[in-house]
Amino acid sequence: MPRQYEDPTRECILVAEDEYLIALGLRQAVLDHGARPIGPFAQVDEALAVLDGRQRVDGAILDINIAGRPVFPVARRLEELGVTFVFATGYDHWTIPRGHAGVERFEKPIDPHAVVSGLLAQLRACAPRGAERERPA
């Protein structure tokens, strides 16, 4: 019997969070909500590498500051790919660039299940995504 997270019909959720316990909580909440976690990633470059690969990503949860670096390059790449994401952060709303001002922000301390529920509600309200996306040329 295949493991639960190998089901190709489940949403693939990228988690970019460098605080270990928060990252584990988000990963578990993704699983508890029937989705498949990708990560968590504790480095901006790791998350970008996944997005530039062939891995399917349907949604993402981003901390604004990952290991001392702003996560906004990841947010920009997600927008280019048309991937829905939310911020889970301790930073105030004014730290978010105007281009991302409309992105839902969950303030730390977070309830991982509320964050995942919020993201999945947005994803499920949209048209279903296709199969694994192709790498951009």
Image (cartoon, grey):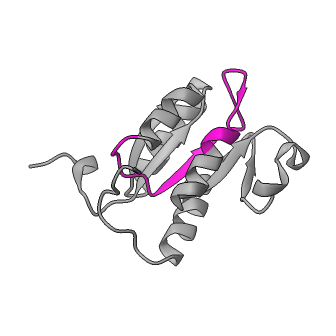
State whether residue 117 is above or below residue 48: below
Closer to the camera in the image, 32 or 129: 129
State whether residue 89 is above or below residue 35: above
Q: Determine the residue positioned at 54% across, 50% down.
A: 60
Residue 116 in which image quadrant: bottom right
Tell me if 88 is positioned left or right of 54 in this view: right
Q: Residue furthest top?
A: 67
Magenta-colored span: 53-74
Q: Determine the residue positioned at 65% across, 39% down.
A: 73
Taking the image as drawn, is residue 4 in sight? Answer: yes
Tell me if 22 is positioned left or right of 57 in this view: right
Q: Is residue 54 magenta?
A: yes
Residue 111 is situated, as x and y percent measured from the top left of the image, at 64, 47
Q: Residue furthest right?
A: 94
**How many numbered markers are drawn?**
0
Taking the image as drawn, is residue 113 in sight? Answer: no
Q: Determine the residue positioned at 19% across, 45% down.
A: 3
Q: Determine the residue positioned at 72% across, 59% down.
A: 103
Residue 54 is situated, as x and y percent measured from the top left of the image, at 33, 45
Tell me if 71 is positioned left or right of 6 in this view: right
Closer to the camera in the image, 70 or 35: 70
State whether residue 56 is above or below residue 28: below
Residue 9 is situated, as x and y percent measured from the top left of the image, at 28, 63
State whether residue 39 is above or below residue 104: above
Closer to the camera in the image, 117 or 131: 131
Residue 8 is situated, as x and y percent measured from the top left of the image, at 25, 58
Q: Is residue 135 magenta?
A: no
Closer to the camera in the image, 24 or 99: 99
